[in-house]
Amino acid sequence: MSRREAKALLREHCDEMLRESIALSFEYLPLPNPPLEIPDFPAQSPNDLTSLTQQALGISSIDTAGFLYRLETIIDNYEPSYIKRHIDPDSEREKWLSRSIVEISERVLILQIKDWLYSALDEESPDTDRWYLSVSSLIGLSLKGSNIIESEGFNLFNSIIYARKPGTSSRKSTGRHQITWNGQSESSNGEISHPSGVLAANSILDILQLHQNNHNTVLPFWLERLSVSTHASFVLNIPMRIQNLIIDCNQNNYENLLMATIHSLSHTPGISKEILYQVSNSEKEYLRRSLASNLSRIDSEDRNFCISLLEKLIDDMDSDTRVLSTTYLGNLARLERTVFIQFANRISKKKDIRMIQRLIESGLRHYLSLDSNDSDNLVPILWIQSNSESRSQLSGMLIEIAKKNQPSFIKISSKIFNLDKDSHTDLVNRITLRNSDLAILIKNIQ
């Protein structure tokens, strides 16, 4: 295959992708209105799919130089390094182009949309025709969903929120963190969105949300990124959108929605906590497991709320959820000793081997580093409840205690003997294998 043929195939696929994207966006009319327009020449929203498609393909067909430039840009940025080292790089490049037609075509189309948006968001002379071409293509690609549009498309979407040309720098916040700050100007929290840009962005999110109910779009990934910004989260109503999606989400996107909720805790705690409570009561095990895995992140925002979630998750019907929630006790062992003891005692009474093993792995070492005397008598109870693997870890911890606090080591051994003589015999045998001198100290305990 010659290089000319590879480029021809790529251009043909770009046109087909452009046609499909615009057609898909027309299933959700009306298209969002442009954020910027000349008052004397108000925009006319297209209602004819054929006309808009022909306009887009017509511009694409005559812009050969633009297509080649965008393709060369992609080759420069994404061509695998092995091609340049190959004995025949031109031939190898052709093979790569042929194998990657879908991916490269999508990147070319994104650059085309970027160029159209650049004209549409020009404050001095906004091109509303280019707006409808760009927004319909962007919506269509976003509805189809892909890893590329998740990241590259989000940058274009973000420029719409602020009615700012794609690729131009935003207005940075000012304040004490800047060397040139004079101490007199008030600190700004960041760039403020454009009112019409917000309307257009909300319309795009509404369309994605309608489609998300039955398909996988980029919406969950975009919501996670938008949730980080207090301002964007507020003007685009991100927490409410998350709440409408998260309970019915599938295993392809639940983690993004959960992380978006956790990000929102700092600026919209009320509804974010409500969503997390809903997740803890969800019938979907993968949602509850993911929540249990992220308790430490939630703790950084609100420890008391996090502990209330732990109260529920630690008694969950799903074994994996209970074990994952137990991992969080490692944090509590360092930061909330009383609460840690409370939950550790609850776990020891459950006689759940996996939870006990995770408790020993995640929290007990921190507990003993702060209290080698084991004032709350956790170690004897956990030893008796533990399996062989956990006892191996515990015996190592006990040897460390013995090196700096022999009376505590003997006391713990004595309590194990009083609770269960067979367990004490196992303790002596394990200590003997590691340190026979320490084993002598506890061998004849009565």
Image (spheres, rainbow, N blue to C red):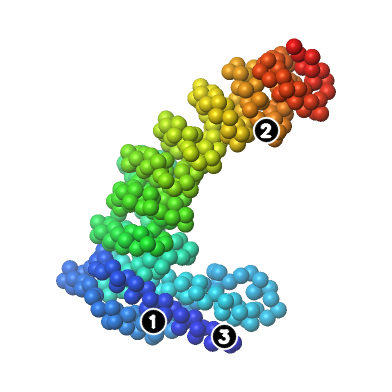
Residue at 55% of width from left, 74% of height from top?
A: 100
Amino acid carrying label 1: it is Ser
Amino acid carrying label 2: it is Asn
Residue at 58% of width from left, 71% of height from top?
A: 79
Task: Give the camera-side residue of 334 and 131.
Answer: 334
Determine the residue located farthest toward the top in the rendered image: 446
Residue at the spot of label 2: 387
Q: Secondary structure at mark 1?
A: helix
Task: Give the camera-side residue of 260 and 436.
Answer: 436
Residue at the spot of label 1: 60
Counting from the top left corner in percent of width and height, residue 404 is at: 72, 19
User: Would you place residue 152 above or below residue 354 in this image?
Assistant: below
Q: Is residue 404 visible?
A: no
Quarter of the image where the N terminus is located: bottom right
Counting from the top left corner in percent of width and height, residue 205 is at: 32, 59
User: Would you place residue 88 above or below residue 370 in this image?
Assistant: below
Quarter of the image where the C terminus is located: top right
Amino acid carrying label 3: it is Arg
Q: Secondary structure at mark 2?
A: loop
Determine the residue located farthest toward the left in the rendered image: 40
Q: Quadrant of residue 136?
A: bottom left
Q: Which mark is residue 195?
A: none
Residue at the spot of label 3: 3
Task: Give the camera-side residue of 351 and 402.
Answer: 351
Q: Is 129 displayed left or right of 259 in the figure?
A: left
Q: Is residue 177 visible?
A: yes
Q: Is 147 displayed left or right of 162 in the figure?
A: right
Mark 2 vs mark 3, foreground winner is: 2
Q: Secondary structure at mark 3?
A: helix
Q: Quadrant of residue 264?
A: top left
